[in-house]
Image: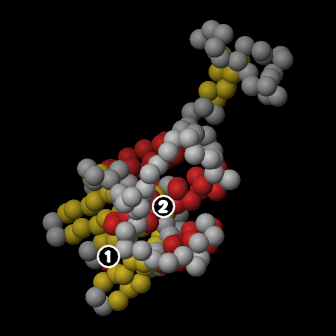
Amino acid sequence: MSRTHSSTGPSLRQSTGFADTSSPDHVYQLNKSLYGLKQAPRAWHSRFAGFLLSIGFTESKTDASLFIYRSGSKMAYLLLYVDDIVLTASSDSLLRRIIASLQHEFAMKDLGQLHHFLGMSVTHSSAGLFLSQRQYILDILERAGMQDCKPCSTPVDTCAKLSYDGPPVDDPSQYRSLVGALPLLTFTRPDITFAV
């Protein structure tokens, strides 16, 4: 952070509680984003993506969080979700090389083999990976008070008559929280995508 004189006019002013009475026409200009600011996630993603591109990864055209590395027969996939990373590669040596590059550039820890990510449990076997969101689903049902609900073949009421002037929900923040949890379920349950 550098301290600079404001020459842009009256639109910039010192923050309440941080005013410097000896220099009332001085403000701070941020040289980089600070954690917690609303633009920080975009700046972090841009910084991380820029580094990945510099070491040979390309951004997926369909998912801005997915990066792909190809060099001859060598391949690696990196999935970035805020500050969680899932990385897999065609060889252990390539995987170690990428991890070393990332650790040299960023403060990060290798947590080893993937077991849990974004509400998904990952089980490794000789046949491949099995992804399950069973515990995530049970947690959502418990938060909604629906632990004893019965399964149904269609996740949407096909005969519903919706009205825009119905009674408001008892707890809007709980409703928003439950609705916000549903999109992650579509990773392993694409059949509920329309309903979500």
Residue 112 visible in this rendered orientation of the protein: no
**What amino acid is labelled 2 in the image?**
Leu
Quadrant containing the N terminus in the rendered view? top right
Residue projecting furthest to the top: 9
For this rendering, which residue is in front, 114 or 137? 137
The residue depicted at 69 percent of the width and 22 percent of the height is 27
- Label 2: how many Cα within 10 Å (few below 14, some 14–19, many 20+): some
The residue depicted at 24 percent of the width and 67 percent of the height is 75
For this rendering, which residue is in front, 75 or 139? 139
Where residue 129 appears, as percent x and y from the top left, is 34, 81
Q: Is mark 2 on a helix, strand or loop?
A: helix
Q: Is mark 1 on a helix, strand or loop?
A: helix
Which residue corresponds to mark 1? Answer: 93
Quadrant containing the C terminus in the rendered view? bottom left
Quick check: 123 above or below 102? below
Which residue corresponds to mark 2? Answer: 182
Residue 5 visible in this rendered orientation of the protein: yes
Quick check: 31 above or below 178? above
Where residue 186 appears, as percent x and y from the top left, is 39, 64
The image quarter in which residue 100 lies: bottom left
Q: Answer with mark 2 or mark 1, whichever residue precedes in sequence.
A: 1
Q: For this view, does 176 lie left or right of residue 93? A: right
